[in-house]
Image (cartoon, rainbow, N blue to C red):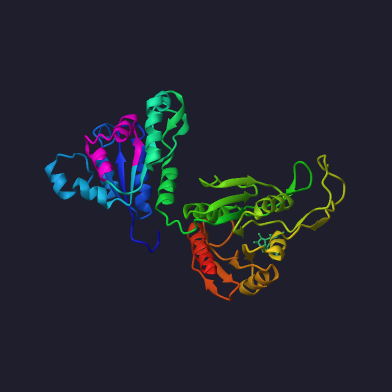
Amino acid sequence: MANDKPKNVVLGVSGGIACYKAVELVRLLVKEQYTVQVIMTRGAMQFVTPLTFQTLSARPVATDTFNLTQESEIGHINLADSADIFVVAPATANVIGKIAAGIADDLLSTVLMATQAPVLIAPAMNIHMYENPILQENLRKLRRIGYEILEPDEGYLACGYEGKGRLPDPEAILEQIRLQLKKKDLAGEKLIVTAGPSREPLDPIRYISNRSSGKMGYALARVAARRGAEVVLISGPTALTPPPGVKVTAVNTAAEMRRAILDEYAACTAVIMAAAVADYHPVEFSADKIKRGKGSLDVRLEPNPDILKELGRRKDGKLLIGFAAETGNLDANAEKKLREKNLDMIVANDVTKQGSGFDGDTNIATIIDRRGATHSLPLMSKDELADQIFDHLLTLRR
Ligand code: CTP
């Protein structure tokens, strides 16, 4: 959120055991420099004390509509107007029922009725309550009105049942909040983002690959979706969780990646090649495991297609963005790739620099574009770098 004015999250907490996750959510929000105003229902106060939320949010917690001190200090209409987003997490069946029926008989439901901010509801309850047709009808009604409903997770429920009804992890709720608050300036873009390494098999057990973790590509996909783009993420093998709202196609080899990209190419507006595609694959694939021999083993490699270069030859009016991971002569090497692959932009980083290597959450990059602009960026998170890359992409659209 670096240079923006801090966004205000009004967080309504209603009475369920998942309240403890709302405590962690407040901590995460504050850490990301959001301001958080917590409203607790009477039920919520049976599970967690207002002091817990007050300490973490560094603001008084609002609990009671008819308390004169609170009303003069916070005020329910002020609360409603101050929200950039109104989140109810956890939302009990009771609170959902009240909101859907237009009942405003406590502070949370009253402020919610008065707010004009986007609303995110995160239901959490027993599986049978969640499946109850009345609750489902209420959720459909709220969706129709434009409220965002965050589906509960499946798993072990505090009531002893297994099934759907768990409040999603605080990280997942935070990601939804980010998604909703982000400017949708990439709406209309249909992006292909590639990520991770490719794996070139030698036999059913071994392969040749590289150290790419996929984190940069996943950050690009996540941030693009937040900013309103339609995203297809074509990913080599990684240990990462796909971002919400993104179509994911899993591939292994460079040839599979090429095929997957070409299948989506006609419909896309831009391709961002963050994947570390292997330049070579073994000439021979042994269907059986290669057994240990006596002497040395020769493996012959032949080149993979340069996917980006092939796209650069076709172009078809798409924006093409490449990456260059280098160990020296950063600008010169990157500019050469920009020209030879006919790219619109290249993002270069020196993998030998601290904070810019493989598998980290940060990067130090230089953006070079086809118009000759060069921007050397400081150390930043991969999400922040993704934002910079899309800001730059939008300048190329003008
Ligand atoms: N790339 C690609 N197909 C390949 C290899 C690379 O599309 N077979 C893309 C990468 O995804 C990246 C860009 O091309 O966006 C540059 O990749 P890099 O490996 O740095 O470039 P190479 O042209 O392979 O040059 P080098 O000799 O430095 O490996």
Percent from the top left, x then y, of residue 117?
Answer: 32, 49
Is 368 included in the stretch rendered in magenta?
no
Left or right of 53, for residue 128? right
**In the picture shown, does residue 112 fall above or below 339?**
above
Is 94 included in the stretch rendered in magenta?
yes
Q: Is the magenta stretch mostly helix, strand or loop?
A: helix
Task: Determine the residue positioned at 77% across, 41% down.
Answer: 204
Task: Determine the residue positioned at 64% across, 56% down.
Answer: 275
Percent from the top left, x then y, of residue 165?
Answer: 43, 30
**In the picture shown, does residue 175 fall above or below 103?**
below
How many marks overall? 0
Q: Which sits in the foreground, 294 or 6? A: 6
Quadrant assignment, res 106: top left
Quadrant assignment, res 145: top left
- Quadrant field for ligand 1: bottom right
Percent from the top left, x then y, of residue 61?
Answer: 23, 44
Residue lying at the far left of the rendered structure: 68
Percent from the top left, x then y, of residue 128?
Answer: 42, 23
Left or right of 299, for residue 320? left
Which of the image's four quarters has the N terminus? bottom left
Task: Determine the residue positioned at 51% across, 59% down.
Answer: 386
Question: In the rendered structure, which segment of residues is drawn in magenta?
Answer: 88-114
Residue lying at the far right of the rendered structure: 294
**In the picture shown, does residue 272 fall above or below 76?**
below
Residue lying at the far bottom of the rendered structure: 372
